[in-house]
Amino acid sequence: MKNVSLFVSIIAVIIAVAAGVLSFTGKPQSANGQAKDASDSTDVTMATSGIVYVNLDRIIQEYDMASDLGAVVETKVKNIQDEVNRRGKQLENELIDFQNKINKGLITRSVAEIQGQDLQKKQADFNEYANQKNNEVIEEQTVMMNQIADAIKTFIDKYNEDKKYTMILTNQSGVPVITADPSLDITDDVIAKINEEYIKEKNKNNK
């Protein structure tokens, strides 16, 4: 099983696959508030045409909700891993003790066969238990990823109700935005506002 600190780093990739490009329709406005005609498009820059992008990796890394959820899941994963390790170590000690008794001739063949069968069953039960716990860890990870992805998507939908950008692209490691004017990057504003909203909601729930 992987520790949550290892899989948090891939959350952004999974969110990108699940959410794809975040695009929002909103008719671009000219400086005087009138809708732009198609004939004006050649003279319009990306920014004024309403196309911007966010760095999703940064949002994940700096989103307070992602940090809080990650800490909770990490604790759960550690507790699960500790219990699996404890049971595994206990079984290992039993196997070593059984082998020592056989080597020293301390038990009869018939007793050894019975104890050997019992240890085989314990091994099978442990493997089933470990697999079950591994599935629990995967489920915890998946739920956390889905919660973060949904929270970001929901926020950006709301965010764009005021901004009315024509399209908001997600950029991760240069994909799909290979290069762009830095002025089109709205990541700082999104991070500031999504954390402001999250902290406000968190404080309200803690009252």
Image (cartoon, rainbow, N blue to C red):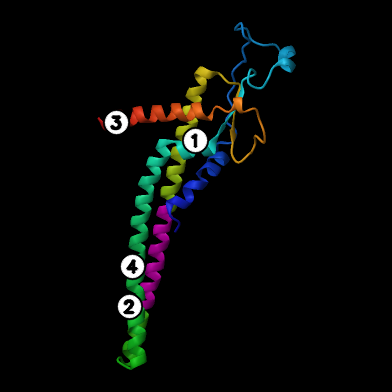
Residue found 36% across the figure and 65% down from its top: 85
Residue 52 shows up from this direction: no
The numbered mark at residue 205 is: 3
For marks 2 and 1, the one nearer the N-term is 1
Residue 90, x across and y down, in percent: 32, 72
Question: Which-is-in-front pick, marks 1 and 4?
Answer: 1
For marks 1 and 4, the one nearer the N-term is 1
Residue 127, x across and y down, in percent: 41, 67
The numbered mark at residue 51 is: none
The residue that mark 1 highlights is 59
Residue found 58% across the figure and 21% down from its top: 165
> Is label 1 in a helix, a strand or a loop?
helix
Mark 4: amino acid? Arg
User: What is the crowding at mark 2: few (fewer than 14 residues within 10 Å), some, or many (at least 20)?
Assistant: some
Mark 3: amino acid? Asn
- Distance from the alpha carbon under mark 2 to that under mark 1: 49 Å
For the N terminus, the quadrant is: bottom left
Are circles 1 and 4 on residues that touch, CB within 8 Å? no
Residue 197 sits above or below residue 29 on the image: below
For marks 3 and 2, the one nearer the N-term is 2
Quarter holding residue 132: bottom left
Question: Which-is-in-front pick, marks 2 and 1?
Answer: 1
> Is label 2 in a helix, a strand or a loop?
helix
Mark 2: amino acid? Glu
In the rendered structure, which segment of residues is drawn in magenta? 118-137
For marks 3 and 1, the one nearer the N-term is 1
- Distance from the alpha carbon under mark 3 to that under mark 1: 23 Å
Residue 132 shows up from this direction: yes
Are circles 2 and 1 on residues that touch, CB within 8 Å? no
Mark 1: amino acid? Ile
The numbered mark at residue 87 is: 4
